[in-house]
Image (tube, rainbow, N blue to C red):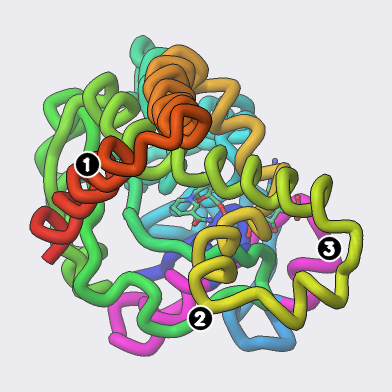
Amino acid sequence: MVVSIIGVGLIGGSMAISLKENGFATKIIGVDASPNNIDKAFRRRLIDEDKSLEDAIAESDIIIISIPVNAMLQVLPKVLDLVTTQVVMDVGSTKFELMNHIKNHPNRKQFVGTHPMAGTEHSGPEAAIPNLFDNKTTVICDAAQSSKEAVEKVENLYNALKMRVIRMDSNAHDIHTAYVSHISHISSFALALTVLEKEKNEKAILDLASSGFSSTVRLAKSSADMWVPVFQQNRDNVLDVLDEHINSLSKFRTYLIKKDFKKIKELIEQSNEIRRILS
Ligand code: NAP
């Protein structure tokens, strides 16, 4: 199977590694806006060839689009204009706006919208790693809008990546990812800003940062180019969960002001419920 990957960064590059390793792809063609990233992708052997968008599509069986979700709105219609029998899939973190954007395209059925729920805080081809997707979940959205054959091909690709495939409509996907993924990033960005504002002694941050601090601010290392378009496209759902988050923070503030440590204990014990759900 010849696979083209548009956007050979963290997700595209990690897919390239695994799809080559497990034999799903016989050849990986890279397409990227950045010649520097194409160069890095060659040096890391993520791709076998680089081609123009037109030539890559003509030679491929599957085209994976792995670029920021705002760029996806321009690139996906172009790709769909060029396909004949090929299957096209994306891996973007938001789904509703993209699905709506191409819903009337004559080649809509050849496209499958997906979101692999796996990643790290790093970006670019240098961040691509093997086994990133092992035993994680991927979402296929609005499967009824795609042809059966296209969905089957994409499911086979995800099975080859050892992922569990679930289906969801794109609206529900955006609501749930706002709750479990997008708010965690905002919270981590805000925590990093708070500490940078209050603690001017960088050495103290380095010396005193425990594993708790490091793990809660880890996501604040993530790329703005990737995340701003996600917040832009999922603004309403993120605002909804952000209001709830601010409400939780204010409860801690109020009980601290009132020295009501019994209530703080209650809040912490309620939050411990997450342990049961995640284990
Ligand atoms: P990334 O590491 O920054 O890689 C994106 C690559 O696409 C970069 O090489 C970028 O080049 C290139 N690019 C940008 N615009 C382009 C265009 N118009 N045409 C061709 N190439 C273009 O980003 P990523 O983290 O892999 O994210 C890719 C997609 O996966 C996003 O849609 C994101 O929402 C989704 N996703 C991310 C994660 C995560 O944890 N990061 C998890 C699941 C899904 P430049 O660097 O020069 O811009």
Going from N to C along the chain, the mark reached first, 2 or 1, is 2
- Left or right of 167 on screen, residue 210: right
Residue 29 placement, left or right of 22: right
Pick whichever, 211 or 78, lies toward us: 211
Along the polypeptide, which appears first: circle 3 or circle 1?
Answer: 3
- The residue wearing badge 3 is 35
Amino acid type of the residue that numbered disc 3 sits on in the rendered structure: Pro
Q: How many marks?
A: 3
Magenta residues, as a range? 14-40
Residue lying farthest front? 259
Indicate whether residue 26 is drawn in magenta. yes
Give neighbour class at mark 2: few <14, some 14-19, many 20+ (Cα, 10 Å): some
Identify which residue, 214 or 92, lies in the foreground: 214
Q: Judging from the image, what secondary structure is the residue with disc 2 in? A: loop
The quarter of the rendered structure image containing the C terminus is bottom left
In-image side of 210 versus 152 (left or right):
right
Where is mark 2, residue-wise? 129
